Image (cartoon, rainbow, N blue to C red):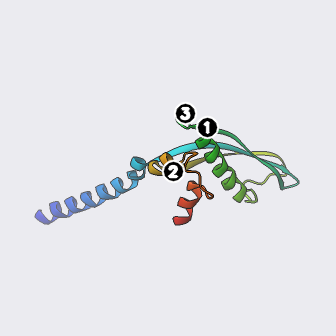
Amino acid sequence: MKYLSVISIIVFLFLFKNVMAQVGYQKDSLQIKVYTEIDYQNFMPQAIRVKKVFCDYCTKFQKEQIGNEAYRRTFLVRNNRKFRLEKGSFRHAMYIRIAKKDFARLKEENQMQDSILTINEQRN
């Protein structure tokens, strides 16, 4: 009986630790939704547009930078078989996750040659 209770406590603590590890990213990062659109003609991408950046607390510059990152990510998946259409436009919704510290540094005064969003993605 003692062993059963000890084992069940250890299993419970292990499961609790794993659940807490999965929630950790929410504490220190922001998740921003972006809609993009890819126009196709004969299975070839013709144009990519950023339709909307859903961020109520962003400045115009921050929205612009997040839109640039969304454009870059959409450009990378434009030839993916799941998204290709013979003719028409594919609407692509994505979430861009950025650390709060990096988001705070995303200002016009701190503008660098490379985007902060791209730099963080290259580290991972």
Q: Secondary structure at mark 2?
A: strand
Outermost right residue: 42
The residue type indicated by label 2 comes to Ile
Residue 46 in the image: state x and y as whole percent: 84, 51
Height in image: 64 above or below 84?
Answer: above
Height in image: 105 above or below 8?
Answer: above
The residue type indicated by label 1 comes to Lys
Residue where numbered disc 3 is placed? 56
In primary-sequence order, the first of circles 2 and 3 is 3
Q: Which of the pair 96/116 is nearer the observer?
A: 116
Outermost left residue: 2
Whether residue 77 is visible, yes or no, is: no
Q: Secondary structure at mark 1?
A: helix
Give the spatial CA distance, label 1 vs label 2. 17 Å
Residue 40 in the image: state x and y as whole percent: 83, 50
Whether residue 117 is visible, yes or no, is: yes
The residue type indicated by label 3 comes to Asp
Q: Residues within 10 Å of mark 2 (few under 14, many from 20)?
A: many
Q: Which of the pair 120/112 is nearer the observer?
A: 112
Which residue is drawn at the image coordinates 39% and 51% (left, top)?
23
The tally of labels here is 3
Residue 51 in the image: state x and y as whole percent: 70, 39
Report the mark closest to the observer, 1 or 2.
1
Q: Residues within 10 Å of mark 3 (few under 14, many from 20)?
A: few
Which residue is drawn at the image coordinates 62% and 39% (left, top)?
53
> Which of the numbered marks, if any, corresponds to residue 60?
1
**Quadrant hosting residue 1:** bottom left
Give the spatial CA distance, label 2 vs label 3. 15 Å
In the displayed structure, does residue 89 sit left or right of residue 6?
right
In primary-sequence order, the first of circles 1 and 2 is 1
Residue where numbered disc 2 is placed? 98
Which residue is drawn at the image coordinates 55% and 50% (left, top)?
110
